Amino acid sequence: MVAGVGNSGNTFTTRGSPRQLVRRVMERPEVAPVVTDAMLQAATAALVDKGLKGDPDGAAFLFELAAAQRGKTGATTAPSGQPGGQQ
């Protein structure tokens, strides 16, 4: 519930999901640059780093990524010598 007195100038917005934002951007292709592999790698590295530092969203991403990777290969841990693998 939102309550207020005498201030009709308030604006309330909610944050759109990434998927909703992509739909809006795709309607106007001149708005966003082409996403490169390097951009994806940098974004992934930033999310992993946030997860390692305890950020809840970063940690959720890290766990989802690990589950997807391990589900695809059937592995339970990363190979030795790989980032996240046991040495």
Image: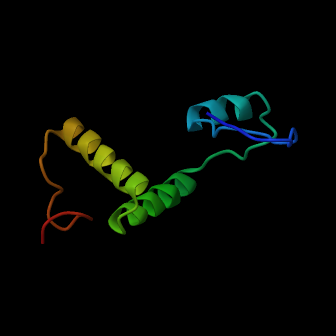
- The vertical placement of 46 against 40, above or below, is below
37 relative to 72, above or below: below
- In the picture, measured across the screen, residue 79 lies left or right of residue 83, that is left
How many tags in the picture?
A: 0
Rendered location of residue 26, percent (x, y): 71, 31
Task: Answer with the quarter of the image where residue 71 lies.
Answer: top left
The quadrant of the picture occupied by the C terminus is bottom left
26 or 35, which lies in front? 26
Q: Residue at x 73, y 39 (%)?
A: 12
Q: Position of residue 27 (x, y in %)?
A: 76, 27
Q: Give the colour scheme shown.
A: rainbow
What residue is rendered at 44% in x and 62% in y?
45
Q: Looking at this view, name the residue that lies furthest to the bottom.
A: 87
User: Residue 36: x percent and y percent?
Assistant: 59, 50
Q: Where, by quadrant of the figure, is residue 84 drawn?
A: bottom left
Q: Residue at x 24, y 42 (%)?
A: 67
Residue toward you, 20 or 45: 20
State the residue at coordinates (34%, 55%): 59
Specify whether 16 is left or right of 77.
right
Q: Give the residue at the far front of this rendering.
A: 5
Judge from the rendering whether residue 20 lies leftward or rightward of residue 42; answer left or right: right
Examine the image and state in which quarter residue 13 appears: top right
Say which quadrant the N terminus sits in. top right
